[in-house]
Image: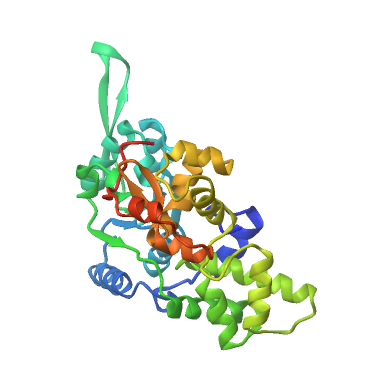
Amino acid sequence: MAGPVAEPEERELEAALRPKNLDDFVGQERVRKQLGLVLAASKIRGRSADHVLMSGPPGLGKTTLAMIVAAEMNAPLRISSGPAIQHAGDLAAILSSLTEGEVLFLDEIHRMSRPAEEMLYMAMEDFRVDIIVGKGAGATAIPLELPSFTLVGATTRAGLLPGPLRDRFGFTGHLEFYSVAELELVLRRSAGMLDLRLTSAGFSEIAGRSRGTPRIANRLLRRVRDWALVHGIESIDARTASAALDMYEVDARGLDRLDRSVLQALVNKFNGGPVGLSTLAIAVGEEPETVETVAEPFLVREGLLGRTPRGRIALPAAWEHLGLKMPGNAVAAAMLPFEEEPREG
């Protein structure tokens, strides 16, 4: 329910709740002000805005900001993604159909193929691409002039972008996780659009379980709305929100079923670790990629799980969260040196 992939109906609701301009966008104060300055200067000059790169975890507003860039510049928006562009010809087809001033949004831009990336270098800098016709010694390059456009790239892994591509963006913004107070503002705006009545304590309860992510906050708000509707509750308070989210297995700290399964396996089956990623994934019945990309980032950020050279370990806060006492040998394991990428899977 709180995962990164939403159902079609969920995506439609999320789109309806997206802010349409920078003034309505909540949070990310630094990025919002910097981007606003870039767009205002471009409008004064009467030219397309510089290319924009947005990085950060999923659900923080990268796609929303791309839509806002197009709206603020009164320009059409073209949306595609890195995985959809596997050949240079795919990118050439998109670029050649752009109109003057159009905004091109590429989600997960770090997953583009290498030939497409190299074609994008020239397109971003010189607004032209070379189309190769023929093969071998008889191949010729036909230059194709492009209209001025603004590329907005979004990535959850900025480190995977090649330096030459990253350097061609005129503005780079990194989105941070939201505070509980900022998420409450997001929820208040969404509740107004959904015509929901919540108390201040109700907003705080949902915000505190939203993992610092507006997308998850809005999704939890809709689930609480459904629970209240079925039970005939008109005004949602903290008790109602807590009961609804408990039913959906989202605990007071924002951990869901998968998060708790990982911690419980570490603590109960492996005595706190260390244990390799593959072994841990088998223990919880998930793929290693799911554990690594869905559960681990939040657990590490919350100080519940550690990554060491010998594998994953449960930190003291994990034992405390599960209501268990940490044994002495687990304390010794928790003192192991950490590293960002463990050598053992």
Residue 240 horizontal/vertical position (percent): 68, 79
Q: Residue 66: x, y in percent?
A: 40, 60
Instruction: Report the side of 77 relative to 13 (left or right).
Output: left
Quarter holding the C terminus is top left
What is the quadrant of residue 91 in the picture?
Answer: top left
10 w.r.t. 274: above or below = below
Query: For the point 56% across and 87% down, which residue is it?
Result: 200
Residue 74's quadrant in the figure?
bottom left
Residue 234 located left or right of residue 334: right
Q: In which quarter of the image is the N terminus?
A: bottom right
Horizontal arrangement in the rendering, residue 57 relative to residue 30 (left or right): right
Q: Is residue 157 visible?
A: yes
Q: Which of 52/286 is in front?
A: 286
As rendered, which of 256 and 138 lies closer to the eye? 256
> At 59% from the left edge and 56% from the top edge, which residue is drawn?
257
Tell me: residue 46, above or below residue 102: below
Residue 296: percent from left, percent from top? 44, 51
Along the viewing direction, whichever of 180 and 254 lies nearer the viewer = 254
The picture places residue 271, in percent across and down from the top left corner, at: 47, 49
Placement of 275 over or under 61, stated as above or below: above
In the displayed orientation, state which residue is furthest to the top: 137
Looking at this view, name the residue that lies furthest to the front.
Answer: 328
Residue 152 visible, this angle:
no
Q: Nearer the viewer, residue 238 or 132?
A: 238
The scheme the figure's colours follow is: rainbow
**Number of numbered markers:** 0
